[in-house]
Image (cartoon, helix red, strand yellow):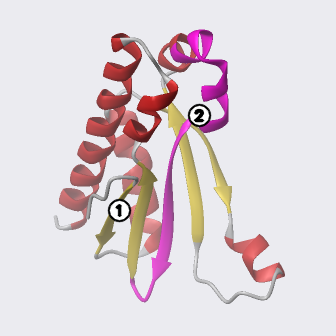
């Protein structure tokens, strides 16, 4: 499902395999994984019952530097991220559509970068789906 503000897919594969595939695919597309953040611990501490929940942060340093040097407010939205949420033997992947930040950037080069990130996230999702079905 690709909504205006959110990109999301369901992977019919267990969480550990999807996590491994996602990180490998992100690297295959030329991005660097900067960190993986656990979210489930905080949710459980607040009383929520949850399966595994992680956020993978990634990006290309030169692209992040290029857009944030023109638009420092973009620091709040970077690096890019994909959330993984385990659910009954499947894993959902979700990411913010980078094109929602079009209003925050004015030049065509920055808008093109946001569109490229959108396309890359879509391709990353497609590749993880392919790997999960092999």
**Residue at 30% over, 28% down:** 116
Q: Is residue 94 left or right of residue 81?
A: left
Residue at coordinates 23% horizontally, 61% vertically from top-left? 129
Q: Circle 1 — which element?
A: strand
State the mark number for residue 78.
2
Residue 73 to residue 110: above or below: below
The x, y position of residue 54, in whole percent, is 59, 62
Q: Earlier in the sequence, mark 1 or mark 2?
A: 1
Q: Is residue 74 magenta?
A: yes
Quadrant of the image occupied by residue 68? top right
For residue 57, what is the image quadrant? top right
Measured as percent of width and height from the top left, residue 71 is found at 59, 17
Residue that appears at 58% across and 56% down: 55
Of the 4 image quadrants, the one containing the C terminus is bottom left
On whether residue 117 falls in the magenta region, the answer is: no
Q: Real-space Cα distance between discs 1 and 2?
A: 18 Å
Which quadrant does the N terminus fall into? bottom left
Q: Mark 1 highlights which residue?
A: 8
**Range of magenta residues:** 67-89
In screen coordinates, is 52 left or right of 88? right
Q: In which quarter of the image is residue 76?
A: top right
Percent across and percent down for residue 40 are 68, 73
């Amino acid at each position: 499902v690709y909504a205006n503000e959110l990109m999301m897919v369901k992977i019919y594969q267990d969480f550990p395999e999807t996590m491994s595939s996602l990180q490998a695919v992100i690297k295959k597309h030329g991005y660097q994984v900067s960190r993986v953040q656990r979210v489930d611990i905080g949710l459980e501490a607040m009383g929520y019952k949850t399966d595994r929940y992680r956020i993978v942060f990634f990006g290309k340093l030169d692209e992040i530097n290029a857009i944030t040097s023109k638009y420092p407010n973009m620091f709040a939205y970077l690096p890019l991220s994909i959330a993984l949420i385990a659910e009954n033997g499947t894993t959902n992947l979700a990411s913010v559509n980078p094109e929602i930040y079009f209003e925050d950037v004015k030049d065509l080069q920055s808008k093109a970068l946001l569109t490229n990130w959108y396309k890359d996230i879509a391709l990353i999702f497609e590749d993880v789906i392919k790997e999960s079905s092999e």
